[in-house]
Image (cartoon, rainbow, N blue to C red):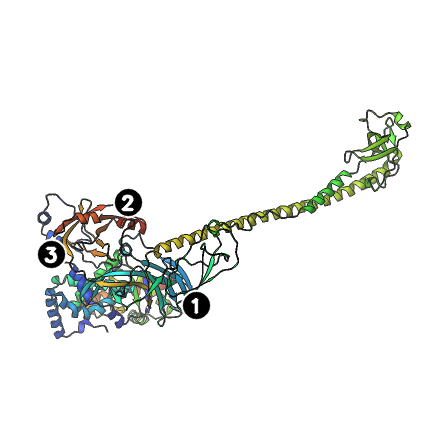
């Protein structure tokens, strides 16, 4: 079960804060946080990679890094999960940069349908192919937003926290990306 | 970062599977191995370079500047690889085999270990049963050098305690089809019968879990003692051998052929299986059959095809050649017009003897000008006999006159008188035409026969060459089998038992005894390779223990060496991934036994290591009394 980190109660957030404080003194107290976020972090990583074993290794790496750098973490009213996601994102991209893994997009057909709906385009086989081409041609920053919104179904608030931007900014960025995609898509269609 | 790959509707991974990979204990252990970042050398160093050098000097308390090599990258915290190959170019090689997936089969490794694969044991990643040939790769790790080269961890964590694993033998097995890994069917097990130099029931079976980063306990293996039946070997590639039918383990192993001098009347070479270990109680039926009576020790086999002479028949060619010679001899001589000044004879020619003369009318024979002794008086003599014979073919004839035992021979030429020229030339032309046709026919026949003869000879030569090659290849194969047998025999010397266990997955399995060493000396260590301070994995072997201890040596804080004071110890490390530095047994012996802190100066080898044998020869020189 994937926990939606942005719907945790205030009580749960307070509990997390206490756990983090205790973990800074005694790393063994980190266990509940590890148990809670292991799966979502793994899924975040695996969403971007092809190799499952490598994703598991990297997940372990993320938590090791988190535990080892916990002394740096400050509660600024941002969920602890977003800090973990940022570490995960950095680790994944470092792997791509070091050419130790292939940047992969994992998409479900139903998500493509959603995108077509947003782009106000028809979902045909031809358009399907064009859309994938368009997605592949996106700059990485744009791709990350599309990925988190459409392929991981993350709410804007969560996307904003991970990317360290405002929620409104996340929304505006996404719709601009969709507009650009529509244009690219139309140009590709005409070229056929 | 543009995506290199897009997966559509990839198979989802379940929460259960993700949960199975969670291990907080591992995370905690990994974290504990590393000091917090704020206490790391680099964090202190961030306060300023001068402060850095002051701290460096004061930390190491040396008057000399030392070169520091931090590994991994300073300030970065990394999980080390679980199976960490220290020398990627030096590996224990796999043996490669094939089995039929439907039928299963038995594999015997060079060491004598056996792998028994049941029928229909393999499935593809989707769980579908596989048919056809499956490739099996198998290798064993027997001693500390093997463990070192494998990179396989020899530590085991259980219930919060750490143990060192002393091994009775470790193996790795993989299976694939057309390059794609296959799995075992859920209801099948493969039996492994691993030879081992270690007796004892205190060993357990473990399977290496590379995801969970630990060994998984899989129960106890069964032990069978080996009855070392003397296995003779093939001598000089001789085909003479004995056939042993082995019935063991409830089914027939098959026929194994060996040579031994007591055997007489032997059967010819058949299947050869090197280094088979027979458990006690194995029934061995020795069968003997036909064979030669040569002394086996000096027997050599002459392949039947090599020295055989070419047996082609060219008598027909000889016959045709004779015919051609006969035809050429009877080449028609062109008659010429008679010369008045020359002597002539009218000769009754036998057409059977001179068929080319047949049909000529009024043909005379003129004595040639080269006959200087001929004169008219010879006409007056009544000769006892006159005979004609062939002269130069196509040119003339010889006429021989005989009286009272004396002969005179003159060369004569067929001539005609003017009025007969038309008729004579017609006959000549016809005769010559016939002659040419006949000669041509025979010559063509001769040519075909000679070509056929040449072809037969070439084929024979080719066949001989092929037989010779086959013979040489067979000898090479015998020699290889002999060498394999000798290698297995070398292992035979150290093998004591067969450890039997079953596996349900492909991977790495270990027959181990987890130990926690007591009463060891403890020394805080600084390691040097050559003259430089060295940071990197350090390996410790105590020669009476079949294990390998890996010492983590990356921090500025001294790691610790725990060792058996009365044991035979060595420490070593890898330099630049291709050579080694060693603190050998003598170095250990010269170390004071009461020392609490020590600088281990490891001597670098000046050679590169290319094979496991190179490494073993360096770390454990020949005739070492090392647990194997």
Where disc 3 sits, the SS reads helix
Q: How far across and how far down the image is residue B249, in percent? A: 39, 67
Q: Are marks 3 and 1 on the same chain?
A: yes
Q: Nearer the viewer, residue A109 or A45?
A: A45
Marks 2 and 3 in Cβ contact (< 8 Å)? no
Q: Is residue A177 visible?
A: no
Tell me the residue that label 2 is attached to.
B607
Where disc 2 sits, the SS reads loop
Judge left or right: residue B452 versus residue B249: right
Q: Quadrant of residue A30?
A: bottom left
Q: Chain of mark 3?
A: B
Q: CA distance from mark 1 to mark 2?
A: 48 Å
Task: Give neighbour class at mark 1: few <14, some 14-19, many 20+ (Cα, 10 Å).
Answer: some
Q: Are marks 1 and 2 on the same chain?
A: yes
Tell me the residue that label 1 is attached to.
B103
Please give the label number shown on residue B39.
3
Q: Which residue ends up furthest to the front in the rendered image?
A: B262
Q: How far across and how far down the image is residue B330, in percent? A: 78, 39
């Amino acid at each position: 079960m994937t926990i939606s980190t942005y719907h945790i109660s205030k009580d749960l957030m307070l509990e997390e804060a206490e756990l983090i404080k205790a973990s800074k003194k005694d790393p063994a107290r980190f266990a509940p946080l590890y148990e809670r976020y292991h799966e979502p972090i793994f899924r975040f990583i695996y969403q971007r990679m092809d190799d499952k074993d490598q994703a598991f290794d990297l997940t372990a790496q993320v938590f090791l890094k988190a535990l080892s750098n916990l002394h740096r973490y400050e509660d600024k009213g941002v969920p602890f999960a977003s800090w973990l996601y940022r570490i995960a994102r950095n680790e994944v991209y470092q792997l791509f940069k070091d050419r130790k893994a292939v940047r992969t997009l994992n998409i479900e057909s139903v998500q493509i349908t959603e995108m077509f709906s947003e782009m106000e385009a028809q979902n045909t086989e031809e358009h399907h192919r064009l859309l994938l081409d368009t997605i592949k041609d996106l700059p990485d920053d744009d791709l990350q937003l599309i990925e988190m919104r459409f392929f991981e179904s993350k709410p804007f608030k969560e996307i904003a926290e991970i990317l360290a931007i405002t929620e409104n900014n996340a929304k505006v960025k996404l719709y601009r990306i969709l507009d650009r995609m529509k244009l690219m898509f139309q140009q590709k269609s005409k070229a056929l | 970062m543009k995506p290199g790959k897009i997966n559509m509707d990839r198979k989802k991974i379940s929460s259960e599977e993700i949960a199975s990979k969670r291990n907080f204990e591992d995370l905690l252990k990994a974290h504990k191995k590393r000091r917090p970042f704020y206490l790391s050398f680099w964090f202190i160093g961030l306060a300023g370079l001068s402060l850095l050098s002051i701290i460096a000097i004061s930390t190491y308390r040396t008057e000399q500047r030392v070169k520091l090599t931090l590994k991994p990258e300073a300030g970065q915290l990394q999980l080390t690889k679980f199976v960490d190959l220290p020398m990627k170019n030096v590996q224990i090689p796999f043996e490669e085999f094939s089995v039929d997936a439907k039928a299963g089969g038995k594999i015997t490794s060079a060491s004598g270990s056996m792998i028994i694969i049941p029928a229909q044991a393999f499935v593809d990643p989707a769980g579908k049963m596989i048919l056809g040939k499956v490739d099996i790769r198998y290798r064993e790790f027997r001693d500390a050098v093997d463990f070192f080269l494998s990179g396989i961890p020899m530590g085991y964590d259980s219930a919060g305690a750490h143990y060192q694993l002393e091994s009775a033998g470790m193996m790795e097995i993989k299976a694939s089809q057309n390059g794609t890994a296959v799995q075992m069917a859920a209801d099948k097990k493969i039996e492994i019968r691993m030879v081992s130099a270690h007796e004892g029931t205190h060993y357990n079976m473990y399977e290496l879990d590379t995801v969970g980063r630990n060994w998984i306990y899989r129960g106890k293996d069964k032990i069978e003692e080996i009855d070392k039946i003397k296995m003779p070997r093939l001598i000089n590639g001789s085909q003479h051998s004995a056939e042993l039918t082995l019935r063991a383990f409830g089914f027939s192993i098959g026929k194994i052929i060996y040579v031994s001098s007591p055997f007489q009347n032997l059967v010819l070479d058949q299947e050869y299986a090197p280094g088979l270990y027979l458990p006690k109680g194995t029934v061995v039926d020795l069968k003997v059959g036909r064979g030669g009576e040569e002394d086996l020790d000096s027997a050599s086999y002459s392949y039947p095809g090599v020295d055989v002479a070419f047996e082609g028949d060219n008598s027909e060619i000889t016959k045709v050649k004779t015919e051609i010679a006969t035809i050429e001899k009877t080449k028609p001589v062109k008659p010429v017009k008679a010369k008045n000044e020359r002597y002539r004879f009218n000769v009754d020619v036998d057409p059977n003897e001179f068929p080319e003369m047949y049909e000529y009318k009024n043909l005379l024979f003129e004595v040639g000008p080269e006959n200087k002794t001929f004169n008219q008086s010879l006409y007056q003599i009544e000769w006892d006999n006159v005979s004609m014979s062939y002269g130069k073919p196509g040119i003339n004839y010889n006429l021989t006159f005989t009286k009272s035992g004396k002969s005179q021979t003159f060369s004569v030429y067929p001539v005609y008188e003017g009025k007969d020229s038309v008729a004579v030339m017609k006959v000549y032309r016809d005769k010559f035409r016939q002659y040419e046709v006949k000669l041509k026919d025979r010559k063509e026949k001769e040519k075909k026969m000679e070509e056929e003869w040449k072809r037969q000879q070439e084929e024979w030569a080719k066949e001989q060459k092929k037989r010779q090659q086959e013979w040489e290849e067979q000898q090479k194969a015998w020699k290889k089998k002999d060498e394999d047998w000798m290698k297995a025999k070398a292992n035979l010397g150290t093998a004591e038992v067969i450890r039997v266990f079953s596996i349900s997955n492909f991977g790495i399995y270990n027959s181990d005894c987890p130990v926690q060493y007591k009463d060891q000396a403890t020394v805080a260590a600084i390691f040097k390779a050559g003259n430089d301070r060295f940071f990197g994995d350090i390996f410790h072997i105590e020669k009476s223990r079949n294990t390998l201890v890996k010492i983590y040596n990356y921090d500025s804080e001294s790691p610790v060496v725990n060792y058996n004071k009365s044991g035979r110890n060595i420490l070593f490390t890898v330099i630049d991934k291709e050579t080694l530095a060693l603190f050998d047994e003598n170095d250990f012996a010269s170390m004071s036994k009461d020392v609490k802190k020590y600088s281990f100066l490891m001597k670098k080898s000046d050679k590169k290591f290319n094979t496991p044998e190179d490494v073993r020869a360096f770390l454990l020189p020949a005739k070492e009394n090392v647990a194997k």
